Each structure stands twice: as C-alpha cells, then as structure tokens.
Image (cartoon, helix red, strand yellow):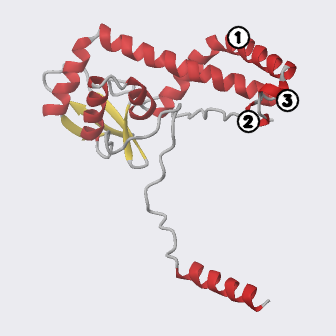
Amino acid sequence: MRLVVALALVAGSVALAQEPKNPDLPKEIPVRYGVPPKVRNYPQDSPKKALLSTLEAIDRGDTNYLVAHLMDPGFVDLRVSDRAKQFEADAEIELSRLRDYQIRNPEKFAPADRLPTDRPKFNALIIEKSRERGFQQLVRDVQQKLLDDPLAIKELQKLLRDGMVADTETGAKITHADVKDKALYLRKIDDRWFLENRHEDAPPPPMVPVPAPKKEGM
C-alpha cells in the first residue's frame, strides 16, 4: 500500500514539475487527403514563401501537395466534394462487392479489415472513397490547367521575383507592373498562407471546410 501511495506522489510531483502547454505554440498541421504536411520543404509563413513553395511544387511535379496544402483549403474541399459526386455510384458498387465477398469468406479477413455492415458507417465509407477519387480528379484538373497555360507559371515567377505585396481584407495580394489586370491573392489561416482562386478585388467565397469522413471499422 505504501508503495502505491509513494508512486502516486512521485507521479503527482512529476506532473506538477512539467511545464504547462503553451497555447501560442503552432497548431499541428493535419494530413489532408492522405498527403502529410512538409512545411520545411514548402514553407508558407509569408505570402512570398507560399508562392515560392507553389512554384517549387509545380517544378517537382508535386501537384498532390500543391492542391492539398498550398491552395485555399476551403476552395479545395468544395471542389473535391463537387467532383466526388461522379464517383459515388462506382464506389458503392465496388465496396458492396467487397463487403459481400468478405461476408461469404470471413476466415480470409481479420475483423479490423472487414467493411462495416451498418448502413450509416457503410455510407460514410462510400463518401470517403468518393472523396479520395474526387481529390485525384482535382489534381488531374490542376495538372491539365498548368499544361494548357504555361504563361501562368511565368507570371507567377515574375510575381515572386519582383512582385509587390499589399494587404487585403482577407490576407494579401501580390502584383507586378508587367502582369496586367491580374493579382495573386493569398489567404492567411493560422500561421500559413494559401493561394486563393481569384485574380481581382472581389470578396472571396467564404471558407467552408468539408472534413473528409474517417473510415470506421465494425
């Protein structure tokens, strides 16, 4: 009994000795669409650094990262949701076939690997799979746009090299005298800057993040 009390006292003293958590520390950046953050490779702590990271991601062919972490997450989530709708029917068919096969052959699958038979959980899995494919479709769309408009990359390079940064209501914009009638707008969320999908002084659409559903087991 004395040993238990002593251990409890030691544990309590250690807990008291620990420094309290600092609420001002940077928030942990979540994985988005299966893409982990790489803030050392792609810093975003200023508008110009976010632009540099964007150009480096394009140069490296890292379009997945560009879409998942460098573009405005609210815009990306909405576009993924829109594209995911076209994949829902196929995802339901594929998952239904796999679930039926697992039901007929339970000995071949560990319980943790079996698809849920509960309808709400199964529907959530369909949405998750559809959103994964919707994200990949958005990545392909961005890749195609970059191929179709090589001038856009040259303009981004000009903005990075000699562009002027100015504050806006929602963040910042970068302009250049030789890039006519266009500006690069960025939005700051927490400590990171993200590229917005607009080129003029118009209010951006409100950011409505759409969380990707997590896979649930039985």
Residue 153 in view = yes
User: Looking at the image, is mark 3 or mark 1 earlier in the sequence?
Assistant: 1
Is mark 2 in CB contact (under 8 Å) with mark 1? Answer: no
Residues at marks 2 and 1, CA–CA distance in whole angstroms: 20 Å
Q: Is residue 137 above or below residue 160?
A: above
Determine whether the residue tagged by mark 2 lies in a helix, strand or loop: loop
| Residue at numbered disc 3 | 118
Amino acid type, label 2: Glu
User: Looking at the image, is mark 2 or mark 1 earlier in the sequence?
Assistant: 1
Front one among 205 and 84: 84
How crowded is the residue under tag 2: few (<14 C-alpha within 10 Å), some, or many (20+)? few
- Name the residue rendered at 69%, 33% in the picture: 215
User: At which x and y percent is residue 151?
Assistant: 22, 13
Q: Which of the image's four quarters has the N terminus?
A: bottom right
Front one among 56 and 25: 56
User: Looking at the image, is mark 2 or mark 3 earlier in the sequence?
Assistant: 3
- Name the residue rendered at 77%, 33% in the picture: 110
Determine whether the residue tagged by mark 1 lies in a helix, strand or loop: helix
Amino acid type, label 3: Asp
Is mark 2 in CB contact (under 8 Å) with mark 3? Answer: no
Taking 21 as reference, is 153 left or right?
Answer: left
Residue extending farthest to the bottom is 2
User: At which x and y percent is residue 3?
Assistant: 73, 88
Residues at marks 3 and 1, CA–CA distance in whole angstroms: 18 Å
Q: Is residue 146 above or below residue 111?
A: above
- Name the residue rendered at 48%, 33% in the picture: 35
Taking 182 as reference, is 186 left or right?
Answer: right
Of circles 2 and 1, the one toward us is 2
| Residue at numbered disc 2 | 216
> Quadrant location of residue 82?
top right
| Residue at numbered disc 1 | 89
User: At which x and y percent is residue 17?
Assistant: 53, 82
